Amino acid sequence: MAGDESTDSKTSPNQKPYGVVNIKTHVAIILDFNELNYDAWRELFETHCRGYQVLGFLDGTSHPTFDKDEEWYTLDSIVKSWIYVTLTQPLLTSIVKKNSTAHSKWQSLEDLFRENKDT
C-alpha cells in the first residue's frame, strides 16, 4: 500500500497550489517600487513557491510538456495571480501583458528592480 501512495503522488498533478486562497497570508509584503522591499518580497515569494512545488514557474525551468498542457497553464496562471495580488497598482500595470507567463513577469520585476538598484 505504501508503494501505491508514492506512485499516485508522482502521477497525480500537484494539488498544493490550488489550496492557496489568500497568498497575502504567506507573502505579507506588498511589493512597492518606493519602499525598497524587493529583496524581502522576493525571498518570501520564492520560499512560498518552493513550498508549493511551483518554483519552476518563476525561474523558467518549468515548461508545458505539450501544446495544450492545461495543467501547466493552470498552475502558471495561479502563480501569475499570486504575483499580481502582491504588487502595488503601478507595478501591476507595468507588467501586465497578454499571453505572458509567470516567468516573464518574474523576470520583468527582476529587471525593473535590479536596474533601479544599480542606478
Image (cartoon, rainbow, N blue to C red):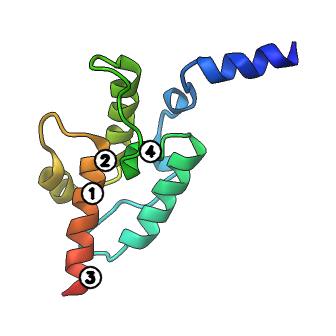
Q: What label does residue 40 carry, if any?
A: none
Report which residue position mark 3 lands on: 117
Image location (x, y in percent) of residue 50: 55, 48
Which amino acid type corresponds to the residue marked 3 in the rendered image?
Answer: Lys
Q: Is residue 97 left or right of residue 1?
A: left
Front residue of this view, candidates 1 and 66:
66
Q: Disc 2 versus disc 1: distance between alpha carbons?
A: 6 Å
Q: Residue at x 35, y 18 (%)?
A: 70
Q: Secondary structure at mark 1?
A: helix
- Do callouts 3 and 4 mark residues in contact (Cβ within 8 Å)? no
Which amino acid type corresponds to the residue marked 2 in the rendered image?
Answer: His
Q: Is the C terminus in the top left, top right, bottom left or bottom right quadrant?
A: bottom left
Judge whether 44 appears above or below 97 on screen: below
Report which residue position mark 1 lands on: 107
Report which residue position mark 2 lands on: 103
Q: Is residue 22 left or right of residue 72?
A: right
Q: Residue at x 54, y 21 (%)?
A: 13
Q: Secondary structure at mark 4?
A: helix
Which amino acid type corresponds to the residue marked 4 in the rendered image?
Answer: Gly
> Considering only order in the chain, which callout, 4 or 3, is on the residue closer to the N terminus?
4
Viewer-nearest of discs 1 and 3: 1
Viewer-nearest of discs 2 and 3: 2
- Do callouts 2 and 1 mark residues in contact (Cβ within 8 Å)? yes
Q: What label does residue 56 carry, if any?
A: 4
Q: Is residue 4 left or right of residue 68?
A: right
> Considering only order in the chain, which callout, 1 or 4, is on the residue closer to the N terminus?
4
